[in-house]
Image (spheres, rainbow, N blue to C red):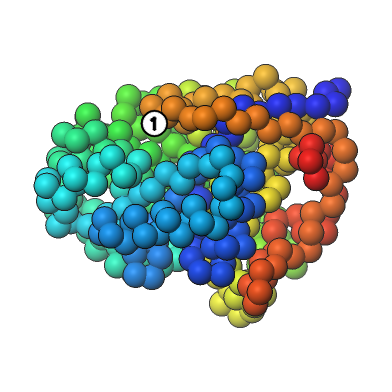
Amino acid sequence: MAKTFTINEPLDMHLHLRDNDMLRLVAPLTSKTFSGALVMPNLVPPVTTKEALLSYKNRILSACNGDNFIPFMTLFFQNNYSYEFLEDIKNEIIGIKLYPAGITTNSETGVSSMDIEVLRPTLEIMSRLGIPLCIHGETNGFVMDREKEFMPIYESLAIAFPDLKIIMEHITTKDAVELLDKYQNLFATVTLHHLLITLDDLAGGMLKPHLFCKPIAKTPIDRTALLNAALKAHPKLMFGSDSAPHPKHKKECCGCAAGVFTSPIALQVLVELFEKHNSLDNLNDFVSNNAKKIYNLNLKSKTINLVKEDFIVPNVYEYKEEKVVPMYSGETLSWSLEDN
């Protein structure tokens, strides 16, 4: 059994950092252990201008306290972006995130139609400029079927825009895994929690609000497909935590917010998971190398060392009035960060 493990330039390719005091709380928990992260733009209001994007990036860097960390910025998709605007901002962003309207947290101003002809003007510009499209791929159908129902839309987009790099964000189903091998321009991220839990873990006994997320956790068959692809480090699959912090009082309530907070434990749990399945040799590809190739990233050297020592997950992370409960709060993990 391994006693130590080193991850080189770990990347989180789907991360929510929020803003203000919540940003100051959660950003250092990622910047300490990751080389970079793809930051979601669904603030209120969403990030749709160069001024807003650069301002948000500066706030993130300030919150990271000088850590060796790159926030890879994204724009919130709109149908009216011009060629001139996207050409000007291209070097400041890693992609544009498309949300169907109202499908998840702060997505009310997302697109109201996934009709290709409606989306074509912006997508053609993105394709010409080489700007990737990141998609929250769910319909408004029955909650367990929403991602599966979105698969034909992914296929239509992949066919209509063959030069457009399309990232299926936080995939949760066997269908999405299978789609990776069907189209050259389709890629995906998968979260830590979707590799570990099913709907039964969330609601099979007493309801566990800190495991409630969108897309919702699916079936054991789906989890197995996701886990197998991750353990093999499928070259078109990247780690993206979708770590989504919400204040404790907004999770432990009626109508709780959707999101699982995993940033402080992501690497420890991934090492534990890959070790359990005798796949540690593939972990660096899954959490770093695949994303570097897909997004053509060059990073400063950063190594994170983990040791086979128990780590008790804090019950809550706090900054001023903000309190966030992590996944596995109060539980003991078998791996720790070396400097913990």
**In the image, is 118 to the left or to the right of 93?**
left
Horizontal and vertical percent for residue 79? Answer: 18, 56
Asked which quadrant contains residue 45, the reply is: bottom left
Of residue 262 and residue 104, the one placed in the foreground of this image is: 262
Farthest front residue? 66
Residue furthest to the top: 281
Against 306, residue 219 (above or below) is: below
How dense is the environment of label 1, judged by Cα within 10 Å: few (below 14), some, or many (20 and up)?
some
What amino acid is found at the position of numbered circle 1 in the picture?
A: Tyr
Q: What residue is drawn where x is 74% and y is 65%?
A: 316
**Residue 47, relative to residue 222: is it above or below?**
below
User: What residue is at 56 percent from the left and 52 percent from the top?
Assistant: 64
Whether residue 164 sits left or right of residue 212 in the image: it is left
Which of these two is toward me, 282 or 149?
Answer: 282
Look at the image and tell me in which quarter the N terminus lies: top right
Q: Does the rendering let one see residue 206?
A: yes
User: Where does residue 319 sit, x and y in percent of width and height?
Assistant: 66, 69
Q: Is residue 292 left or right of residue 317?
A: left
Helix, strand or loop at mark 1: helix
Q: Quadrant of the C terminus?
A: top right
Q: Which percent across, then down, holds residue 209?
A: 66, 67
Find the residue positioned furthest to the bottom.
Answer: 254
x then y, percent, for residue 339: 79, 41
Q: Which residue is mark 1?
A: 295
Q: Residue at x 43, y 24 (%)?
A: 293
